[in-house]
Image: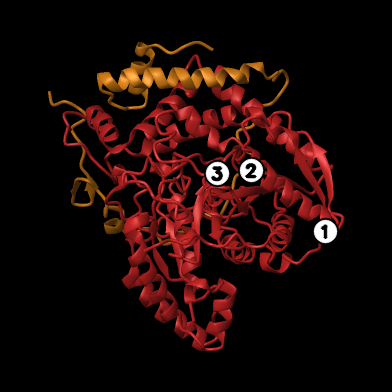
Amino acid sequence: MDILKKSVLELRELLDKGEISSREIVQAYIDRIEKTEPKLNSFVTLTFEEALKDADRADEMIRNKTHTTLTGIPIALKDNISTYHVKTTCSSKMLENYRPPFDATVVKLIKQAGMPILGKTNMDEFAMGSSTETSYFGPTKNPWNLEYVPGGSSGGSAASVAAKQAPLALGTDTGGSIRQPAAFTGIVGIKPTYGLVSRYGVVPFASSLDQVGPFARTVAESAALLSLIAQYDKYDSTSLNNPRPDYLRSLEKDVKGLRVGVPKEFFIDGLDAEVEQAVRKAVKALEDQGAEIVDIELPHSDKALATYYIVATAECSSNLARFDGVRFGHRSENTKDSVTMFKHTRAEGFGPEVKRRIMLGTYALSAGYYDAYYLKALKVRRLIKEDFDKAFTKVDVIITPTTPSTAFKFGEKVQDPIAMYLSDVFTTTANLAGIPALSMPAGLSSNNLPIGVQIIAPSLAEEVMLSTAYSIEKALGSIGLPELEV
Amino acid sequence: MSSITKETVCYVADLARLYLTDEEIEQMTESLNKILEFEEQLNSVNTDNVEPMAHAVPLNNVMREDVVEESMPIREAMLNAPDEVEGFFRVPRIIEKD
């Protein structure tokens, strides 16, 4: 039996029948990571010993019948999600040796469910980047082609799932950091409604935009993980306290009569022809199953990226003020006086992209520029949200490409911040509006790289987003996983 | 909106408590100007009578009873301290001696 090829739901059945143990599953993934990691660099920290102990505990839970859907299934976590006494670096020199004194709420939920944690995955430094090239620990490679980026910032989590180093992973998405790498590596990634998943213990980048979400190979597996992590949390003051459905049960819903919006603003000049074709095919698949296709307008979406880079950097400049060398993280040797220590600690601890964003955000919030940049961006943000409110009176879901093109090569965009930012051009709208969005594979390009399609739904309408994705997945079939030679 | 000078970059770096080398100041001025040029497009949007939106979901204060709960032990809170003395974070002297 090839454990690595089994879906999470197939593994569940085998575990429940006693035909396999969690320890065997975890060992199979450890072997795979050991073989593939020298090529990929998906992880910053590996936690195999603890994972095997967790597996034994999970096997005990299964024997005692106190298990749930994901008990005994291993997972990888992005390295900005706090894990008790296990290094949480945000792929930054600033936090190279930081060991959190507490678990993030999502980590607590994962541990309670008996999911062994394989390790902490690589990312762009402090989640600022779209390729993992800003990581202090070197980039992660795309398992489809090692010359290409896996996307970012959650590139390590995405690559680990695509390369069968983990069946599931968690990432965070502030402007596309789950969906863009999911698209580039040919897997499913979900950014939930803002407030659906707790942010407690997740190192913040832009607090009004950040959300934690799942990576999986298929829609059903991503739904299972979403169900586990989507819990109200009193430790996150923005956590929504509304009932959460079991997302696995919502998949089979018929798309007959479903109104599917296709916004013309997302089919722009810079859109790769093969990407457009794949998205049109996904739309056609829904139409063939009885969905009604509606042309819609989201007139301010072309301003989303410019809006995003003001809002996100303003919030990041404030959030990253905590890194001052006093309580945790790097401290400069240059401690002549406090201010000198702060300035040199931050100069030594942060990489160039993080410094650039702190500078842009500080500038946008500074006296004299606040109205022109920050306040202006918040007004356009409202217009972007109102575009969606209007569109969702006419349609149930919206379909777009996830990214304008497939994965790019290392070094291609790293010198030009605007070119790099443009790979988030279709994903930032959902963060600004606080609504859920999912990326799923919709085909392969002629040079054998995955193409992602994005499904956007109204606030808290994850169920219709997932059932739409499930219908597309059934119709298009799987693109498979990369043949990674080791 | 206007272009950003080296002097402004130095001023903002000071606000952000970020030491920049001369080379970094050059590069930062250039790349921030490129980004601000890109941001010019926001000027073309009519936002008269539009309320700014800092958050996508309505936020309310979350209240709880004022009861003592378990808190983080001091040794855990000090776990990552770069410089610790008897449960305190030690920092460079802030107030000069007479």
Which mark is in front, 2 or 3?
2
What residue lies at 25% left-to-right and 48% top-to-bottom? B81
Quadrant, the C terminus of chain A? bottom left
Residue shown at the point (45%, 85%) measured from the top left:
A60
In the drawing, what numbered circle is on residue A274? 2
**Colour scheme of the picture:** by chain
* Disc 3: which residue: A406
Please tell me the numbered disc located at residue A354. none
Three-letter code, disc 1: Gln
Quadrant for residue A349, please give it: top left
Q: Amino acid at mark 2?
A: Glu
Q: Colour of chain A?
A: red
Q: Is residue A24 left or right of residue A96?
A: right
Q: Chain of mark 3?
A: A
Of pointers 1 and 2, the one earlier in the residue sequence: 2
Label 2 CA crowd tier, 10 Å (few <14, some 14–19, many 20+) = some
Q: Considering only vertical position in the picture, is A189 above or below B3?
A: below
Q: Is residue A366 visible?
A: no
Point out the residue furthest to the left here.
Answer: B98
User: In the rendered structure, the residue with mark 1 lies on which chain?
Assistant: A
Q: Measure how far apart labels 1 and 3 are at the Cα level.
A: 27 Å
Check whether the beta carbons of the residues at disc 2 and disc 3 lie within 8 A of each other. Answer: yes
Residue type at the position of mark 3: Thr
Q: Residue at x 43, y 30 (%)?
A: A357
Q: Is residue A279 above or below residue A475?
A: above
The total number of labels drawn is: 3
Q: Residue A322 in the image: x percent, y percent?
A: 36, 39
Residue for badge 1: A289
Furthest-front residue in this view: A446
**Residue at x 25% of width, y 22% of height:** B21
